[in-house]
Amino acid sequence: MTQSTHIKVSTAERITTIRFDRPDKKNAITVEMYAALGAALEAAAGDPQVRAAVLAGSRDCFTSGNDLGDFMRVAQGGSPAGTSDEPSAPFRFLRTIATFESHWSPRSRGSRSASVPRCSCTAI
């Protein structure tokens, strides 16, 4: 999984919590953070024990949006920290979150009951 010092991931009681942790910048999301978000969601979707994923902010802010300075650096050919494929990280994250619920269904989790709810990703 892509690591980021500004994304904290924990799983407890079948719920994966993905928390923004960059309070000094109001949790503004960098390209590196998008890579970590996408990897965390993909890991949660692939874990048969996880039934839900929660995106959460830290302290006083969920997120202020994209870190425009970081995105401008990438747009101008700069290299963000981390892996070489990071410029596509925001799109990978969007694709992952858009298809997230399709990863869970009663059939895909091995349930025999059609009444088992599908899981989703929730932002708080």
Image: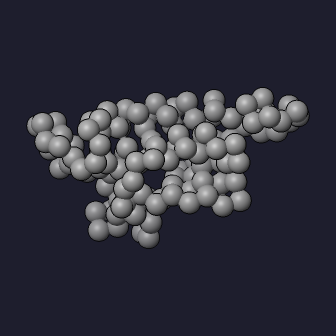
Q: Which of 80 and 98 is in front in this view?
A: 80
Residue, far right: 113
Q: Which of 25 and 41 is in front in this view?
A: 41
Which of the 4 image quarters holds residue 11? bottom right
**Residue 81 falls left or right of residue 15:** left
Q: Is residue 98 left or right of residue 21?
A: right
Measured from the top left, where is residue 51 in percent x and y? 69, 46
Residue positioned 37% across, 56% down in the render: 4
x 44%, y 70%: residue:
59
Q: Is residue 63 visible?
A: no
Tell me which corner region of the image, top left, top right, bottom left or bottom right, holds residue 73.
Answer: top left
Instruction: Please state the horizontal and vertical placement of residue 76, each as a whole percent of the image.
Output: 11, 37
Determine the residue positioned at 26% across, 38% down: 84
Instruction: Tell me if I can see residue 55 in this picture.
Output: yes
Q: Quadrant of the C terminus?
A: bottom right
Q: In this view, does 23 lie above or below 97?
A: below
The residue furthest left is: 76
Q: How many marks?
A: 0
Q: How was the colour assigned to the protein in this rendering?
A: one colour
Q: Is residue 104 above or below residue 25?
A: above
- Residue at (43, 38) in percent of width and height: 93
Picture coordinates of residue 7, whole percent (x, y): 42, 57
Measured as percent of width and height from the top left, residue 32 is found at 31, 48
In the image, residue 85 sits, relative to residue 6, either above or below, namely: above
